[in-house]
Amino acid sequence: MKKTRITENVYWVGAVDWDRRLFDSLIPLPEGTTYNAYLVEGSEKIALLDAVDPSMLHVLMGHLADVPRIDYIISHHTEQDHSGTIPNLLERYPDAKVVASDKAKQLLTDHLKIPQDKIIVVQDGQTLSLGDRALKFIYTPWVHWPETIVSYLEPEKILFTCDLFGSHYASSDIFVRDQAAVYEAAKRYYAEIMMPFANLIDKHIQRLEPLEINMIAPSHGPIYQDHTWIVSAYRRWVSPQPENTVLLAFVTMHDSTKLMAEYLTGSLAELGIKVDRFNLPTTDLGKLAISLVDAATIIIGTPTVLGGPHPLAAYAALVINALKPKARYFSVIGSYGWGGKAVETLKTLVSGLKVEHLQPVLARGLPKENDYTTLQELAKTIAEKHRQLQLM
Ligand code: FEO
């Protein structure tokens, strides 16, 4: 995609990474991603807002081929997918200064070896004049890392948010066209990147609310010309109120746990509870994360392996714990042959969650009638808990 004008003085100069399928060696990217960078031409100064991932340096440099001067490189966020090519830009534009938050200054030096004297620190609320237009910086820490900021361009009234409101969604469209597809990608992005910081993001959104916004321009995914729907979605996602959903993530070896998962799924459904069920060996981690945004109850299903949970169940618990979902209840189902500590280990792995632990259900070998009865009791308990939260 070529450099694209988005308003008279603002251009998209980013890169579309259609084929990338993994981020941070962890996060699946079924729709690829983009690294959006923006060029703002003021009457006196020219600013580049963020850069691109090092793998896409050639694309960025191609967009800038006819740009002889850049005065400021705004680094909203130090992570390398946005700042990794700043050292190359400084070689090409040796007079440019990098503009960033106070916390970013050290990170830019630590991660990218950018000399400190090349960095201008802006404070929260500070404005940078480009002549006939200006960028106002707003500190929004932890919209992924502690140094993150957003900027607001006047008179265009564009809010540049970097990771916040972003989506890993490669597209030939600069602006959102397929809202449903971007919604799914943005929710996945929120779940994987933003959810651990939901409380802070809630405060940031409240703080940004008074701004008159014509566009939200994130650094991943299409630009929002109508931004109201994504802000509303974020408000729902950061809300502490869960939905009437059980996330059931399980792994099975010889079908005992699978039989239990199937029975519990049916029991919960009969009681009017939505079940998001994930068979862990084939689960897309992003889909599981999306379910965590809403689920009121999390159940992990595991056989006992070498005295503990199956490693895939342990991995799921570790990820769930790290993402800090809003779920209120947690339990374990599964099987064992001769003993073990699968439940204790999983409980330890999710010790960061603020959940009530419901009675686990473990079967010796294949589940028997009494195990199914206990699973039915677990389903009834969950329904009662969800009713108490007025979810059903
Ligand atoms: Fe898109 Fe946290 O970097």
Image: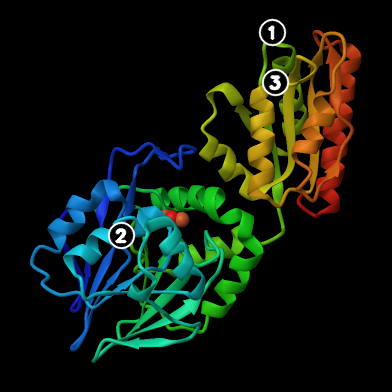
Q: Confirm or deny contact between disc 2 and disc 3 (CB under 8 A).
A: no
Q: Residue at x 55, y 72 (%)?
A: 205
Residue labelled with disc 1: 254
Mark 3 crowd level (few <14, some 14–19, many ≥20, 10 Å Cα): many
Nearer the N terminus, badge 1 or badge 2? 2
The quadrant holding residue 318 is top right
Secondary element at image label 1: loop
Image mark for residue 36: 2
x%, y% of residue 295? 68, 45
x%, y% of residue 155? 31, 87
Residues at marks 2 and 3, CA–CA distance in whole angstroms: 40 Å
Q: Amino acid at mark 3?
A: His
Label 1 or label 2, whichever lies nearer to me, is 2
Label 3 or label 1, whichever lies nearer to me, is 3
Secondary element at image label 2: loop
Q: How is the image coloured?
A: rainbow
Q: Quadrant of ligand 1?
A: bottom left
Nearer the N terminus, badge 3 or badge 1? 1
Q: Nearer the viewer, residue 217 or 232?
A: 217
Q: Confirm or deny contact between disc 3 and disc 1 (CB under 8 A).
A: no
Q: Amino acid at mark 1?
A: His
Q: Confirm or deny contact between disc 1 and disc 2 (CB under 8 A).
A: no
Q: Residue furthest bottom?
A: 132
Residues at marks 3 and 1, CA–CA distance in whole angstroms: 12 Å
Tell me if the residue at label 2 has its CB under 8 Å from ligand 1. no
The quadrant holding residue 373 is top right
Q: Image height check: is 91 above or below 151?
A: above
Q: Image height check: is 180 above or below 228?
A: above
Mark 1 crowd level (few <14, some 14–19, many ≥20, 10 Å Cα): few
Q: Image height check: is 257 above or below 204?
A: above
Residue labelled with disc 3: 310
